[in-house]
Amino acid sequence: MKIKSMRKGAAALAATAIVLPAVPSLAQEAPRLQIGGTTYTKWLAGSTRNQGALYNFTTIPGEGFGDNGVGTELELLLNARLSSQVEVRGRIHSRFNQNFWTNYGGFGPKDGDCVAGNCGEFDPRSNQYIKLRGMAVTLTPGYLVDSATIGANDFGQFDPFVLGRIRYIDRDNAAGVLVQGSALERQLTWDAAAVALPRLWAGPNFKTGGYHATDAAYVFQTRYTSNDLFDVGGIFQYVDDRELNPKDFNTDDGRSLYPRFRNGVGGLKAGFHVGSVLDVRGAFYRSYASSENTNLFGATNADIRFVPKSFGLDGYSAVPAGRLEDNTWKVDVTVSDPLDIGLSLNAQAFSIGANYVSMMASRRESDVLLTEGTDGTFAYPGFNNRSYGVYPGGPTAIGYGGWTNETQQVATINVDNEFTDFDEPMAQTVIGWKGVTFNPVYSNGALDIAGEYSFITYNTNWQAWGDSSRAITDSPYPGAELDSGVLHNFRSAYQPFQDKRTHIAVLKARYVLDIGRGLDVFGKVKFIHENDKRLNDKKYLPYQDGDCAPGGGGCANVRRTYDPAGQFSTADDLYGNPAVLPGGGYAFKPFDDISDDDRVLNYSAFNLGTGYQLTDDLYASLSYTKFLADLKDGNTAFQGYNRHQMVSGLHDKNMVSVKAKYILAGVEFGLEGQYLFGSFKPDFGGGYTPVVADETIARNFGVPEGSLGFERRGGFGWQSLATRDLSQARLKAFMKAQF
């Protein structure tokens, strides 16, 4: 015991001898810890009376959505400066989800579905859990590299076409190693990173398989600025998703890996800057993607390693199947007030490849195109923003009003609008888009005017998914909700038949009247005209000419094939013939003309509003918006790919919106309340016999008993012919306190 004590004493003296010389240095550079934070409380109130969660929208099963409830989240911000060369930062953050005030901490057992706080106190969706986020260490050694960040990062310094931000609630959940450097007095800069691949969505079927510990994305970018007139840069990313090789039976030397999904993206960018007047920027990208195609890992979707070869007609995935290569490019030109009268012009030409794949491209919070695109108010299938409206039950998530703002364009089908509220921007895929946009801007004192004209056609204009050698229901492209609805579903880049062109025109203005503190008057006019012939070749019609006798005399069901071998027909699992009703007539129109699925849209939106600074701390505004859509979206022969409510007809939607913002000594209050009302008057053409909704149909589909409609293909579902009057009230208010 005495010897052990002596050894301990000697060790202590040695440690003291080592530490003492460093004490003066530590005194000079003592670590500094800063703690701050934010508390955010949100109130939701709406007439749809959903209480699944404290967000208006999600597509993730079990997460829930809602428009009623109150909840509070806490964010603690930690920052420690250990020395002039070492900084540590992190966040401790709770999450809304289902932590309603009424949960009282989430106590209680699970009761039914895990939504509306029913998960109980042991489930993070409802127990007000606190989560570590944004933990990173940044080193600035002063030699070799400018900085190195190890840990969490939002990686926003890269390119949204290649590697972009995730989403604001998880922005710095991404983690990796980022090294940044420069040379030639910072004329040359570079960034290199290895980023852990998100196992929850970054691959085929929204998965990275079963073995994910070493899955990563590797990216390098550089930029050289020769002078004020010219700069050039490049970026390259490689995504590597591997699984344990199931054919490696010898484990004596470890386990080998086999690639499940690989993705490479390279880009070149250049800019020419002629003084303050002319700016020209161009970018070109080429992508390569390859999914494992031998069925090495599993035969069914039940195996997490499974890599699909086909997505049927309307499958879901973050990436198409198979091996893909394609190009994307854009050129931006800005002419800044050349006549010195306040008038400038922005212009852009672009082409996003149909097979362009960048697994880590920005999923939202980025806008890769100049056009403001479509609107979020009709953002989901169905006139009321309901996804699969032909099935009983299933309420809308975002509701009739949709999202309020214009869309954000992202260069991926892996679009993320999860956990958003109605007042946030909606992200929309632009895979396949190509065209031009002109954006004049005029500013003169209290007056600001901006306009847009865009012409868009599509690299996805094809027949039979661009490959007539395969069945329609054997597609490498995930169609998601397909292209059914008033405007366009945010993640539906692909549909089997498309021949589409789009025109967008916008004019918006704001003027400040010299009244009191200044009265803001603002307005906007927007027009969209779109024509899509969809199926445009007679050989793709499902049945032979004259297959169905006029007047409901019945159909012979003689298939028409479109491939050289005579195997495939659109009659297979897609466009079946109608039944003859007991009283005579067809249940729906036979698909016997290539115009039966044509889509023509004339859409307009008109907005007028005013705002006023009521006090030094309070600003409020009131606005009115009218949305009008005259849409022909195929007739009853087409039926929205058999899954969605048909929306052909006249849509008249109105929105009254009140906004307020109040700031009081470090606390910010915000509010937006909306009341939306309107009507849908369907027009599905002719060629069928309407029938009357009985009690069961009325109960299952929410239509008046005795109203007219028609029975859909396959003997299920119902499509009402009645004019529908719709309304939705919703409110979001928040309090944000920073400390």
Image: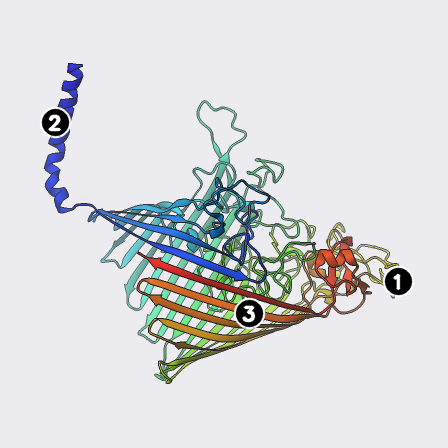
**Which quarter of the rendered picture does the N terminus lie within?**
top left
Residue assigned mark 2: 13
Front tag of 3 and 1 = 3
* Residue 603 placement (x, y as % from top left): 60, 73
Front tag of 2 and 3 = 3
Q: Residue at x 46, y 49 (%)?
A: 264
- Residue 163 visible here: no
The quadrant holding residue 447 is: bottom left
Front tag of 2 and 1 = 2
* Residue 529 placement (x, y as % from top left): 60, 73
Of residue 104 and residue 566, the one placed in the foreground of this image is 104
C-beta proximity under 8 Å, tags 2 and 1: no
Residue assigned mark 1: 584
Of residue 177 and residue 97, the one placed in the foreground of this image is 97
Is 89 left or right of 358, judged from the image as shown? left
654, above or below 24, in the image:
below
Q: Is mark 3 on a helix, strand or loop?
A: strand
Q: How far apart are marks 3 and 1 (CA)?
A: 44 Å
Of mark 2 and mark 3, the one earlier in the sequence is: 2
**Which quarter of the rendered picture does the C terminus lie within?**
bottom left
Of mark 2 and mark 1, the one earlier in the sequence is: 2
> Hey, what amino acid is under mark 2?
Leu
